[in-house]
Image (cartoon, rainbow, N blue to C red):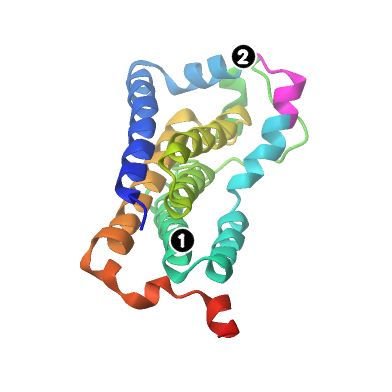
Amino acid sequence: MADTRSIVRWFGGTWLVLAVPLLILLLATNKLALHASINSHHTPWADAFFRHFTHVADGWVPTVLALLLLLLKDLRSFLMLGLSSGLSAIVVQTLKHGVFADMDRPSKFREALGSMDWVQGIDQYQHFSFPSGHSTAAFSMCIALAVVLGHRRLAVPFALMATVLAFSRVYLSQHFPQDALAGSTLGTLSGIAVHHWLYISPFAKKRWLTCNLLRRQNQ
Protein backbone atom coordinates (compact mmCIF):
# COMPACT_ATOMS: atom_id res chain seq x y z
CA MET A 1 0.00 0.00 0.00
CA ALA A 2 1.26 3.48 -0.86
CA ASP A 3 2.38 5.82 1.92
CA THR A 4 -0.97 7.55 2.09
CA ARG A 5 -0.09 9.36 5.30
CA SER A 6 2.41 11.56 3.46
CA ILE A 7 -0.24 12.30 0.83
CA VAL A 8 -2.66 13.45 3.52
CA ARG A 9 0.06 15.54 5.17
CA TRP A 10 0.91 17.32 1.92
CA PHE A 11 -2.74 17.91 1.09
CA GLY A 12 -3.53 19.13 4.61
CA GLY A 13 -0.42 21.28 4.70
CA THR A 14 -1.34 22.97 1.43
CA TRP A 15 -4.85 23.63 2.71
CA LEU A 16 -3.44 25.06 5.95
CA VAL A 17 -1.03 27.39 4.17
CA LEU A 18 -3.94 28.81 2.19
CA ALA A 19 -6.57 28.74 4.94
CA VAL A 20 -4.69 30.54 7.72
CA PRO A 21 -4.06 33.81 5.82
CA LEU A 22 -7.69 33.79 4.67
CA LEU A 23 -8.87 33.30 8.23
CA ILE A 24 -6.74 36.24 9.40
CA LEU A 25 -8.13 38.36 6.57
CA LEU A 26 -11.69 37.38 7.45
CA LEU A 27 -11.18 38.33 11.08
CA ALA A 28 -9.82 41.74 10.09
CA THR A 29 -12.27 42.63 7.30
CA ASN A 30 -15.99 43.25 6.97
CA LYS A 31 -17.44 40.32 5.03
CA LEU A 32 -19.42 42.48 2.60
CA ALA A 33 -16.45 44.73 1.88
CA LEU A 34 -14.19 41.72 1.30
CA HIS A 35 -16.68 40.03 -1.01
CA ALA A 36 -17.17 43.22 -3.01
CA SER A 37 -13.41 43.67 -3.29
CA ILE A 38 -12.88 40.11 -4.56
CA ASN A 39 -15.58 40.62 -7.18
CA SER A 40 -14.70 44.19 -8.13
CA HIS A 41 -13.50 43.17 -11.59
CA HIS A 42 -14.50 40.15 -13.65
CA THR A 43 -13.36 39.07 -17.10
CA PRO A 44 -15.42 37.24 -19.73
CA TRP A 45 -13.07 34.23 -19.79
CA ALA A 46 -13.13 33.88 -16.00
CA ASP A 47 -16.91 34.19 -15.96
CA ALA A 48 -17.20 31.36 -18.48
CA PHE A 49 -14.58 29.22 -16.75
CA PHE A 50 -15.99 29.45 -13.24
CA ARG A 51 -19.60 29.12 -14.44
CA HIS A 52 -18.76 25.64 -15.77
CA PHE A 53 -15.85 24.52 -13.58
CA THR A 54 -17.86 24.93 -10.37
CA HIS A 55 -20.00 21.93 -11.39
CA VAL A 56 -17.03 19.62 -10.84
CA ALA A 57 -17.98 19.86 -7.15
CA ASP A 58 -21.63 18.96 -7.72
CA GLY A 59 -22.75 16.01 -5.61
CA TRP A 60 -23.13 13.61 -8.52
CA VAL A 61 -19.44 13.86 -9.46
CA PRO A 62 -17.99 12.11 -6.36
CA THR A 63 -20.90 9.64 -6.55
CA VAL A 64 -19.99 8.59 -10.09
CA LEU A 65 -16.27 8.52 -9.29
CA ALA A 66 -16.87 6.35 -6.22
CA LEU A 67 -18.85 3.85 -8.27
CA LEU A 68 -16.06 3.72 -10.86
CA LEU A 69 -13.55 3.04 -8.08
CA LEU A 70 -15.77 0.24 -6.82
CA LEU A 71 -15.61 -1.40 -10.24
CA LEU A 72 -12.06 -0.58 -11.28
CA LYS A 73 -10.06 -0.49 -8.04
CA ASP A 74 -11.27 -1.88 -4.71
CA LEU A 75 -13.71 -1.46 -1.85
CA ARG A 76 -11.24 0.58 0.20
CA SER A 77 -11.00 3.20 -2.56
CA PHE A 78 -14.77 3.23 -3.00
CA LEU A 79 -15.28 3.78 0.72
CA MET A 80 -12.54 6.42 0.89
CA LEU A 81 -14.26 8.61 -1.67
CA GLY A 82 -17.83 7.64 -0.81
CA LEU A 83 -17.56 8.13 2.94
CA SER A 84 -15.37 11.23 2.74
CA SER A 85 -17.89 12.92 0.45
CA GLY A 86 -21.02 11.43 1.99
CA LEU A 87 -20.27 12.09 5.65
CA SER A 88 -19.09 15.64 5.00
CA ALA A 89 -22.26 16.27 2.96
CA ILE A 90 -24.44 15.14 5.87
CA VAL A 91 -22.57 17.41 8.28
CA VAL A 92 -22.65 20.44 6.00
CA GLN A 93 -26.35 20.09 5.21
CA THR A 94 -27.16 19.71 8.91
CA LEU A 95 -25.25 22.89 9.69
CA LYS A 96 -26.57 24.76 6.66
CA HIS A 97 -30.25 23.99 7.24
CA GLY A 98 -30.15 23.74 11.01
CA VAL A 99 -27.55 25.58 13.05
CA PHE A 100 -26.87 28.37 10.50
CA ALA A 101 -30.20 28.43 8.65
CA ASP A 102 -30.49 32.21 9.08
CA MET A 103 -27.27 33.03 7.22
CA ASP A 104 -28.02 34.43 3.76
CA ARG A 105 -26.03 34.42 0.55
CA PRO A 106 -24.47 37.44 -1.21
CA SER A 107 -27.45 37.98 -3.54
CA LYS A 108 -29.49 38.90 -0.47
CA PHE A 109 -27.16 41.88 0.02
CA ARG A 110 -27.08 43.29 -3.51
CA GLU A 111 -27.65 46.91 -2.44
CA ALA A 112 -25.04 46.76 0.33
CA LEU A 113 -22.50 45.19 -2.04
CA GLY A 114 -22.75 48.15 -4.39
CA SER A 115 -21.63 48.05 -8.02
CA MET A 116 -19.54 44.88 -7.88
CA ASP A 117 -19.61 42.46 -10.82
CA TRP A 118 -22.17 39.65 -10.98
CA VAL A 119 -21.79 36.70 -13.33
CA GLN A 120 -24.74 36.53 -15.69
CA GLY A 121 -26.64 33.40 -16.63
CA ILE A 122 -26.71 31.58 -13.29
CA ASP A 123 -29.39 31.22 -10.66
CA GLN A 124 -28.49 33.28 -7.60
CA TYR A 125 -29.67 31.62 -4.41
CA GLN A 126 -30.39 33.73 -1.36
CA HIS A 127 -30.50 31.48 1.70
CA PHE A 128 -28.51 28.72 3.48
CA SER A 129 -25.11 30.26 2.85
CA PHE A 130 -22.94 28.80 5.62
CA PRO A 131 -21.04 26.51 5.11
CA SER A 132 -20.53 26.09 1.37
CA GLY A 133 -21.63 22.63 0.25
CA HIS A 134 -19.65 22.81 -2.99
CA SER A 135 -16.47 23.77 -1.13
CA THR A 136 -17.00 20.87 1.27
CA ALA A 137 -17.52 18.47 -1.63
CA ALA A 138 -14.47 19.81 -3.47
CA PHE A 139 -12.08 19.21 -0.58
CA SER A 140 -13.54 15.89 0.58
CA MET A 141 -13.46 14.59 -3.00
CA CYS A 142 -9.99 15.88 -3.87
CA ILE A 143 -8.27 14.60 -0.73
CA ALA A 144 -9.91 11.20 -1.30
CA LEU A 145 -8.76 11.09 -4.92
CA ALA A 146 -5.22 12.01 -3.92
CA VAL A 147 -5.23 9.13 -1.42
CA VAL A 148 -6.70 6.46 -3.69
CA LEU A 149 -4.43 7.37 -6.60
CA GLY A 150 -1.53 6.91 -4.21
CA HIS A 151 1.02 9.42 -5.50
CA ARG A 152 2.35 12.09 -3.15
CA ARG A 153 3.10 14.44 -6.03
CA LEU A 154 -0.65 14.66 -6.70
CA ALA A 155 -1.52 15.92 -3.22
CA VAL A 156 -0.68 19.57 -3.81
CA PRO A 157 -2.32 19.78 -7.28
CA PHE A 158 -5.49 18.21 -5.90
CA ALA A 159 -5.49 20.64 -2.96
CA LEU A 160 -5.08 23.55 -5.37
CA MET A 161 -7.88 22.18 -7.56
CA ALA A 162 -10.16 22.03 -4.52
CA THR A 163 -9.18 25.60 -3.66
CA VAL A 164 -10.10 26.85 -7.13
CA LEU A 165 -13.43 25.03 -6.90
CA ALA A 166 -14.11 26.65 -3.53
CA PHE A 167 -13.10 30.05 -4.91
CA SER A 168 -15.55 29.58 -7.78
CA ARG A 169 -18.40 29.79 -5.26
CA VAL A 170 -17.15 33.21 -4.14
CA TYR A 171 -16.48 34.39 -7.69
CA LEU A 172 -20.00 33.41 -8.69
CA SER A 173 -21.35 35.13 -5.55
CA GLN A 174 -23.07 31.96 -4.41
CA HIS A 175 -21.14 32.18 -1.13
CA PHE A 176 -19.05 34.49 1.01
CA PRO A 177 -15.35 33.65 1.59
CA GLN A 178 -16.04 32.41 5.14
CA ASP A 179 -18.60 29.95 3.74
CA ALA A 180 -15.95 28.52 1.42
CA LEU A 181 -13.34 28.41 4.21
CA ALA A 182 -15.71 26.54 6.53
CA GLY A 183 -16.57 24.12 3.74
CA SER A 184 -12.92 23.48 2.96
CA THR A 185 -12.30 22.75 6.63
CA LEU A 186 -15.17 20.28 6.85
CA GLY A 187 -14.15 18.54 3.64
CA THR A 188 -10.50 18.25 4.61
CA LEU A 189 -11.19 16.99 8.14
CA SER A 190 -13.71 14.49 6.81
CA GLY A 191 -11.15 13.11 4.39
CA ILE A 192 -8.48 12.91 7.09
CA ALA A 193 -10.83 11.04 9.45
CA VAL A 194 -11.97 8.54 6.80
CA HIS A 195 -8.37 8.01 5.69
CA HIS A 196 -7.33 7.18 9.25
CA TRP A 197 -10.14 4.63 9.58
CA LEU A 198 -9.53 2.93 6.22
CA TYR A 199 -5.74 3.10 5.98
CA ILE A 200 -4.26 3.36 9.49
CA SER A 201 -6.64 2.04 12.16
CA PRO A 202 -6.98 -1.69 12.95
CA PHE A 203 -10.00 -1.75 10.63
CA ALA A 204 -7.65 -1.06 7.70
CA LYS A 205 -6.35 -4.66 7.98
CA LYS A 206 -9.67 -6.16 6.86
CA ARG A 207 -8.85 -8.28 3.82
CA TRP A 208 -12.18 -7.63 2.10
CA LEU A 209 -11.23 -3.96 1.68
CA THR A 210 -8.91 -5.00 -1.16
CA CYS A 211 -11.72 -6.79 -2.99
CA ASN A 212 -12.17 -5.83 -6.66
CA LEU A 213 -15.63 -6.62 -8.04
CA LEU A 214 -14.56 -7.08 -11.65
CA ARG A 215 -11.68 -9.32 -10.70
CA ARG A 216 -13.95 -11.51 -8.61
CA GLN A 217 -16.46 -11.82 -11.44
CA ASN A 218 -13.72 -12.93 -13.83
CA GLN A 219 -12.43 -15.63 -11.51
Q: Amino acid at mark 1?
A: Gly
Residue 162 in view in this figure: yes
Q: Amino acid at mark 2?
A: Ser
Residue 188 shown left or right of residue 63 in the figure: left
From the image, which quarter does the C terminus lie in? bottom right
Residue found at the very far left of the displayed protein: 202
Mark found first going from the N terminus, 1 or 2: 2
Give the spatial CA distance, label 1 vs label 2. Answer: 35 Å
List x then y, in percent, for residue 129.
Answer: 50, 41
List x then y, in percent, for residue 4.
Answer: 34, 50
Rendered image quadrant of residue 14: top left
Classify 10 Å Cα crowding around label 1: few (below 14), some (14-19), many (20 and above).
some
Disc number at residue 40? 2
List x then y, in percent, for residue 186.
Answer: 38, 46
List x then y, in percent, for residue 43.
Answer: 72, 18
Question: In front of the other: label 1 or label 2?
Answer: 1
Q: Nearer the viewer, residue 1 or 26?
A: 1
Write the residue at 49% across / 39% down. 158
Write the residue at 35% across / 20% down. 21
In the picture shown, does residue 181 fall above or below 187?
above
Write the residue at 59% across / 40% down. 126
Mark 1 element type = helix
Disc number at residue 39? none
Residue 119 in view in this figure: no
Disc number at residue 86? 1
Rendered image quadrant of residue 8: top left
Write the residue at 37% across / 18% down. 25
Q: Nearer the viewer, residue 65 or 122?
A: 65
User: Which contiguous range is marked in magenta?
Assistant: 40-48
Q: Nearer the viewer, residue 176 or 163?
A: 163
